[in-house]
Image (spheres, helix red, strand yellow):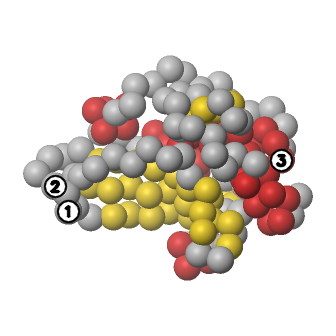
Amino acid sequence: MTRADIVAAARTWIDTPYRHQASCKGAGTDCLGLVRGVWRDIIGDEPEPVPPYTPDWAEAMATETLLEAARRHLIEISIGEAERGDVLLFRRSIARSNLAKSRSFMPIGGGRCVRPGLCHGGVGGSRRRFGFQI
């Protein structure tokens, strides 16, 4: 498995519409579904079952579920080490609340990335980024 393999797999997900809880190339995916789908394309079976979750699962429960899962199955790197094909997690605090939005994307080079297409708004707030290698 090379970075080029990961990028090629991620590119096949381009134009897949946003669908909550989905991980089906061409039919629908969310942030977690993209990482799951590329994992299946490159490695094979997913490392653990994914329980049902609501769109605001991490926000409502004030947990770092996506980050915790990434730490169980991927190799954590500093954000400065991130290269094309790595998994980047983005957590953005929402102003005037204790909530946050967790998202993931995969850089593919040339300043471009693959990520699900639904953007959730939020005004202001701080950002924390985490990088991982498959």
* Mark number, residue 42: 3
In terms of depth relative to the viewer, which is nearer, 116 or 78? 116
Depth check, front residue: 57 or 65 = 57
Q: Quadrant of the C terminus?
A: bottom right
Q: Residue 130: x and y, percent?
A: 50, 62
> At 52% across and 37% down in the image, what residue appears?
18
Which of the numbered marks, if any, corresponds to residue 95?
2
Q: What secondary structure is found at the residue carrying circle 2?
A: loop
16 above or below 95?
above
Give the Cα distance between marks 1 and 2: 5 Å
Q: Residues within 10 Å of mark 2 (few under 14, many from 20)?
A: few
Sooner in the amino-acid sequence: mark 3 or mark 1: 3
For the point 71% across and 63% down, the residue is 85
Instruction: Name the spot of residue 121 as percent of width and height, x first.
Output: 28, 50
Residue lying at the far left in this picture: please name it.
96
Which label number is shown at residue 124? 1
- Residue most extreme to the right: 1
| Vertical side of 112 occupied by 12: above or below | above
Q: Nearer the viewer, residue 17 or 107?
A: 17
